[in-house]
Image: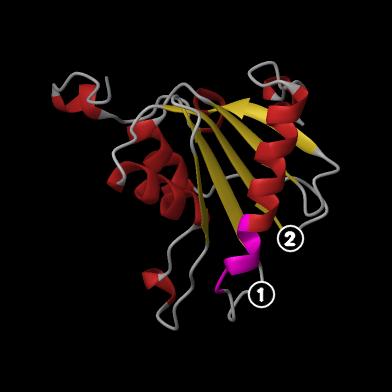
Amino acid sequence: MGFQQYIHNDHDELSDFGFSQLKEKCLNARNVSYSPYSNFRVGCTILTETGEHFSGANVENASYGAGVCAERTAICKAVTEGHRKFKIIAISGDDEEPITPCGICRQFIREFAPEVPIYMFNKDGSKFIKVFLQDLLPLSFGPENLGIKFLIQ
C-alpha cells in the first residue's frame, strides 16, 4: 500500500505520560458522541501549544449533511476559547484499525494546523499511527492561495 510510506510509529513530540494522557482523552471523547445513524463513534483531542487539551466527538443529524465530525468539534472548541496554535491532533474511532480524518476535516485541519502531527488510534488504543497533514492532503488549498499569509501566528 502506497500510504505506508507516510506512517510514523513514534510519539517523539510527547513523553510516555503525555502520550498516554492524550490517548485516554481521545478514546474517552467518543463517549459523548451522538451517532444514532452510523453507530460509529469518533473522538478527537487537540493538544495546544500551551499544553491544554480540547476534546470533541461527532454529532450526527437526521439531515446527514448537518452532522459535525469530532475533529471539527474539537477545533471549534479550541479556537472559540482563544487557542489557535496546536501541537498535536489525536483521533479515535470504533474500528479495529486506526481511522483517518474525512476530507472536510482534513481541509479544516489545514486552516488551523497544517504542520502538526496527527495521531490516529484504533478503538481500544492498542494500535496507532502518526502522519502529517501534508501526507493526507498533498497540494492543499489554504490562505496563501487567496493571497493571505498564514493567519495563525
Other-residue count near label 2 (Cα within 10 Å), few / some / many at <14 / 14–19 / ≥20: some
Q: In the image, what residue type sits under mark 1? A: Asn
Asked if the residues shown at circle 1 and circle 2 are in contact, with their CB atoms under 8 angstroms apart, the answer is yes
Q: Residue furthest left?
A: 147
Q: Residue furthest right?
A: 126
Q: In the image, what residue type sits under mark 2? A: Asp
Label disc, if present, on residue 39 of the rendered structure: 1
- The question of residue 96 being in magenta is answered with no
Query: Is label 2 in a helix, a strand or a loop?
Result: loop
Q: Tell me what residue is drawn at x 37 percent, y 71 percent.
A: 66
Looking at the rendering, which quadrant does residue 42 occupy? bottom right
- The question of residue 32 being in magenta is answered with yes
99 or 78, which lies in front? 78
Task: Give the mark nearest the N terminus, 1 or 2.
Answer: 1
Q: Is residue 53 left or right of residue 124?
A: left
Looking at the rendering, which quadrant does residue 8 occupy? top right
Label disc, if present, on residue 94 of the rendered structure: 2
The stretch of residues the image draws in magenta is 29-34
Q: Tell me what residue is drawn at x 45 percent, y 49 percent.
A: 74
Q: Is residue 48 left or right of residue 100?
A: left
Residue 83 picture location, percent across and down: 34, 35
Query: Is label 1 in a helix, a strand or a loop?
Result: loop
Residue 15 picture location, percent across and down: 71, 20
15 or 74, which lies in front? 15
Other-residue count near label 1 (Cα within 10 Å), few / some / many at <14 / 14–19 / ≥20: few
On the question of residue 16 being in view, the answer is yes
